[in-house]
Amino acid sequence: MHNFIIQHSKKIALIILGCLLAINYIIIVNGINSNLFGILFSILLFLIGGRKTSFNMNYPLLGLIFLLEFISYRLHTKSIHFLALSLFVCFVYYSFTQKFSFIAFICVLLFSSLFNTFFDYLTVEIKQTLCYTVYLTLKNFIHIDKIEGVNFYINNAKITIDTACMGLSMFKTGLLAGAFLLTLEERKQQKHFNIKQILLFSFFLILLNIISNYFRIITLILFNCTEENAFHHTIGLICFVFYQIAPMLFLIRFFKPAKETIADSKSENFKFFPLIIATVILFATSLEIKKEQDYKLLDGLNPTYEASKGIWVNKEVFKIVAANKLIYIKTPAHNPLICWTGNGYKVIESKVIKKNNEEICFAKMEKNNELYSSYWWYECNNKKYSSLIEVLLIKLVYNKPIRLINETNKML
């Protein structure tokens, strides 16, 4: 039996991989739909950029999969589970070929739905920080009445920097171009970059993206072109090429791969034991995630909210329409800023404030020329938190139920 397993280990590994992908079919389809191009590009980089490495990746990959699946198992986070499945595919490929691409590995992380979620949570803060930096620059050259979040008031006219003006989609495009450039350089030199070189080059690409967005916002304000049209997109492409692609092509001249590629060796053995452990972890998490979860959103809810007058929008969202106020009680996975933006509201300002000696989140929003104030916080054991990371750590360790409460009303 042992000899049979050793002899057919690769076929067994492929069957296991197929079963895992079938069990997680819906999660995989959703993940691919959101990042089809990026995922295909990452696979292509693994195929053309993978090389023999003297560093044993079996246990680092196993450890990373275990960490991701532990978080996913406790928090029922499908985006993290999808990332673990992606890493398992890389694990199987490495086990077959003993080839690995750190550049492609970074692309897998970049195009995971976990990274998308992380970026969505930071979008508003990034916008406000960049807009204020632009304000500090432009106020020395043109007259600006005031700045309010992402709104510039110039000569009694309001110019709003929308999410589309941020060029966030260019962020991934720039990193993809950088990854492709590094891979081409490796193949041309028949050598490979070390981890420090790859991370340093990625850091410069992120810095160039920030600079590109900074000058893009300045140009859009000077030309008063924040509405989406052909000129708006042309400015975005010009800034992307001039401030990101061109400097990247210049920088790559100073990054030369130094490590010689390890020659193919037929003595490499297929490591089956780490794959067995990873498989058990992935199957256990896959079955747990399929279970219906009781979020206990209304357990111990403050009676002043009058839950009897509310309705379930879905199993993760409960809505109460009160006098001059709209109240949502949700799972912590729902970011109010993303929800409001998706419903046509423009977030003007977002910050953490103190109310009744407790820290909560506040946002000032606009829709149809009307202003709204929105307050929200995460609640666990009747204690309020403003940090999502903090409450997720509490749930991760103590497995306590968490809810998000969002109160919104019209500003007079």
Image: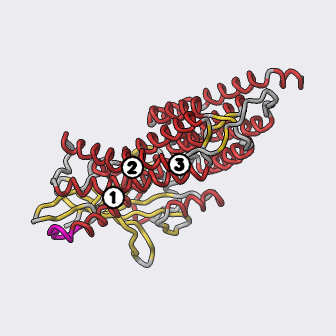
Checking the image for residue 247, the label placed there is 2
**Vertical comparison of 269 with 302: above or below:** above
Q: Secondary structure at mark 1?
A: helix
**Vertical comparison of 15 with 24: above or below:** above
Under mark 3, the amino acid is: Phe
Which residue in the protein does label 1 denote? 127
User: Who's the residue at 40% across and 63% down the image?
Assistant: 376
59 and 76: which is toward the camera: 59
User: Who's the residue at 22% across and 54% down the image?
Assistant: 219
Which residue in the protein does label 3 denote? 255
**What residue range appears in magenta?**
139-147
Q: Callout 3: 10 Å neighbours few (<14), some, many (20+)?
A: some
Q: Answer yes or no: do the residues labelled 1 and 2 have beta carbons within 8 Å?
A: no
Q: Position of residue 150 (x, y in %)?
A: 26, 61
Under mark 1, the amino acid is: Lys
Q: Callout 1: 10 Å neighbours few (<14), some, many (20+)?
A: many
